[in-house]
Image: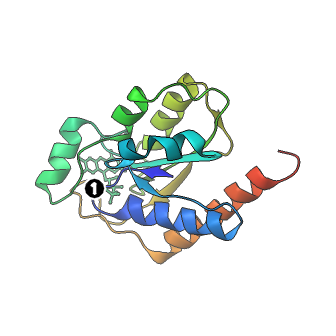
Amino acid sequence: MVFESMFGCTRAVAESIAEGMTAAGLPTVVLDVDDVLAHDDVVARARLLVVGAPTHMRGLSTPRSRALARARGGQGDLGVHEWLDALPGLSGRSTAVFDTRSWSRFAGSAGSRIEKLLRRRGAEIIAPTQAFGIEGGEDGRATIDDAQLQLARAWGGSLAAHLLSPVH
Ligand SMILES: Cc1cc2nc3c(=O)[nH]c(=O)nc-3n(C[C@H](O)[C@H](O)[C@H](O)COP(=O)(O)O)c2cc1C
């Protein structure tokens, strides 16, 4: 599981998804994108690679949007986009994608951008991208409620069940 998070919501979702995966029989390592380069081997060996990021400016964060988030109290340097750009091919690898975003119908989606980048690298996406709604909004300082974290645990469980099912 590789996640990007500046205000902690996507981190909390990632940890809950990982709990659900682990409980369903797929032990999961959770890596902040800021630390993932030191763990290339974990990424290379993973049976399932789950990638998640916050929606910024209707898509994936950029150096500029992250600078804006830092100015509002967020923390973090690297983005999932830059990490994926530098990653070797993922041909035939199983992946799944999630994002966090506001509830607005104009929210956009970091996840659909991640999907495109993964497909371009030859990855197989094993489940529809899952969005998790945050409270707060575009000024940062977002929070996420327990119902979304429960959904995250359940989604993690369903990913593991799908991957571990004999017909997969
Ligand atoms: C610079 C910036 C731009 C954002 N743009 C959007 C957006 O276009 N759509 C949206 O739904 N949320 C947007 N948000 C809210 C983020 O989605 C929210 O901060 C994020 O999901 C919180 O996740 P994190 O706590 O893991 O950083 C934006 C936030 C920032 C800081």
Which quadrant holds residue 37?
top left
Viewed as shown, does residue 129 lie left or right of 138?
Answer: right
Q: How many marks?
A: 1
* 99 and 105: which is toward the camera: 99
Residue labelled 1 has its Cβ within 8 Å of some atom of ligand 1: yes
- Residue located at (45% from left, 41% from top): 40
Position of residue 33 relative to residue 103, above or below, is above
Identify the amino acid type marked 1: Met
Q: Position of residue 67 (x, y in %)?
A: 16, 44
Q: Quadrant of residue 97?
A: top right
Q: Going by the image, does 165 lie left or right of 141?
A: right
Q: What element carries label 1?
A: loop
Up-down relation of residue 17 to residue 115 (above or below):
below
Give the image quarter of residue 61. Answer: top left
Residue 166, horizontal then vertical, whole percent: 88, 51
Task: Answer above or below: position of 137 versus 52.
Answer: below
* Residue 91 screen position, x and y as percent: 63, 26
The residue furthest right is 167
Q: Can residue 109 be seen in this view?
A: no
Q: Which residue is drawn at 50% across and 68% down?
A: 148
Q: Name the residue under label 1.
A: 6
Q: Residues within 10 Å of mark 1 (few under 14, many from 20)?
A: many
